[in-house]
Image: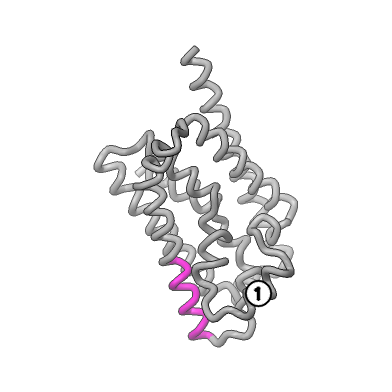
Amino acid sequence: MELFIYLFFALFSVLNPIGTIPIFVGLTQDYNQKERSRVSLWTSINVCIILLISFFIGQYVLSFFGITITALRIAGGIIIASSGFSLLNGQFNKNKGINKKVEEEIQNRNDIALTPLAMPMLAGPGSISLLIAYYQEHHAPDEMIISSIAIVVVALSIYFVLRSAHYLANFLGTSGIVAISRIIGFLTIAIGIQYIISSILSIIRGI
């Protein structure tokens, strides 16, 4: 249960679907309720698939390129902490890789569920590196099952958040969304720094 809770909250903080609400609302402002539901569903499915692939196959990618888990944890920690700082500063669009030009191109697409919503807005380098590093420490059969369930539950949470995005945007308002995202950003920074500290301690122990 502890593994499930840790991975769920770590992933939820890094993915930060709450911070994605303003962008989702902007991209789907001309959609009807049925279309928004469809986009929300496929976005959560795509995120789930991306995260599961990262969790189970990411280690082989590291081996192919000769990247150590320590290097990945440090790089991932920097990326995660950087994302947290962006959330604290309220730079949601910049953090999610969205600018004016990209947003204009998105408006002309028929399907936005995979890009940019699922990737890179939600499942980005931070969450992918987090899962790869997590797998290295928790790859027993029961731990992998629990981790997979946590990933699925996170994807379901994303669906419900996006499904209710327009209602949440009206209820919370801009200030409410910013406040929640900054709290999540603070937790995200702590997760990233913890990754870096753990890697440094691992290096010191190996000397």
Q: Residue lying furthest top in this view? A: 207
- Label 1 residue SS: helix
- Would residue 2 be visible to someone looking at this image? no
Residue 206: x, y in percent? 47, 15
The secondary structure that dominates the magenta segment is helix
Q: Is residue 93 left or right of residue 157?
A: right
> Crowding near pointer 1: few (<14 within 10 Å), some, many (20+)?
few
| Horizontal side of residue 124 vs 49, given as left or right | right
At 72% from the left and 56% from the top, the residue drawn is: 91
Q: Is residue 188 above or below residue 194?
A: below
66 in relation to 160, above or below: above
Name the residue rendered at 44%, 33% in the picture.
Answer: 66
On the image, the x and y values in percent for residue 45 come to 41, 66
Q: Residue at x 38, y 34 (%)?
A: 137
Q: Amino acid at mark 1?
A: Glu
- Asked whether 21 falls inside the magenta stretch, the response is no
Residue 188, image x, y percentages: 59, 45
Residue position for label 1: 105
Estimate the x, y position of residue 169 in percent, counting from the top left: 65, 72
Q: Is residue 194 above or below residue 41?
A: above
Magenta-drawn segment: 33-44
- Residue at the image point whose x is 45% and y is 66% from the top: 44
In the displayed orientation, state which residue is furthest to the front. Answer: 65
Residue 156 occupies which quadrant of the picture?
bottom left
Q: Is residue 43 above or below residue 90?
A: below
User: Which quadrant of the figure contains the N terminus?
Assistant: top left
